[in-house]
Image (tube, rainbow, N blue to C red):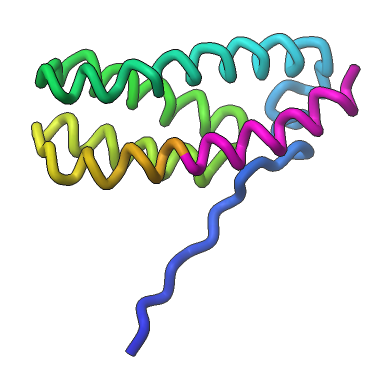
Amino acid sequence: MGQIVEQKAIFDKKKLLDNFSGDKEGVLDVLKIFIRRTENQLKNFPGLILREEWENAWRDAHTIVGSGRILSAEELGGIAERLERSCKNKDNAEAAIALPLLEESFARFREKAADCLEELK
């Protein structure tokens, strides 16, 4: 029998605005900062993992988990949690699986967020 996989939201603009009490300017600022910071973190993960800098990799993944969930990016937060767990366990094999999934999820998030940024301007 097939396994049931829960579909998580890539990005929920309404929930995000609710989380920020409708503060569109605040949402714009936070989204821009999150996107820029996460792009940098994703560039740094391969090196951190290669050098086995697990604490730094774990911290960056943990930041994406929390921020992603606050920004209503449940899919991104869930996948980042998988990477976070692999870093905590110092598991190179799992990190090698989780990182490309995180990069793909972030690309989907960034596309949806870009639409939101345009709408909120």
29 or 43, which lies in front? 43
The answer to if 107 sits in the magenta stretch is yes
What quarter of the picture does the N terminus occupy?
bottom left
Q: Position of residue 53 (x, y in %)?
A: 14, 16
Q: Position of residue 2 (x, y in %)?
A: 36, 84
Q: Position of residue 97 (x, y in %)?
A: 26, 47
Q: Position of residue 68 (x, y in %)?
A: 52, 30
**Placement of 21 over or under 7, stated as above or below:** above
Q: Which residues are magenta?
A: 104-121
The answer to if 118 sits in the magenta stretch is yes
Dominant secondary structure, magenta: helix
**Placement of 71 over or under 57, stated as above or below:** below
Q: How many marks?
A: 0
What quarter of the picture does the C terminus occupy?
top right
- Please report the residue visible at 36 percent of the width from the left and 77 percent of the height from the top: 3
**Residue 60: which quarter of the image?**
top left
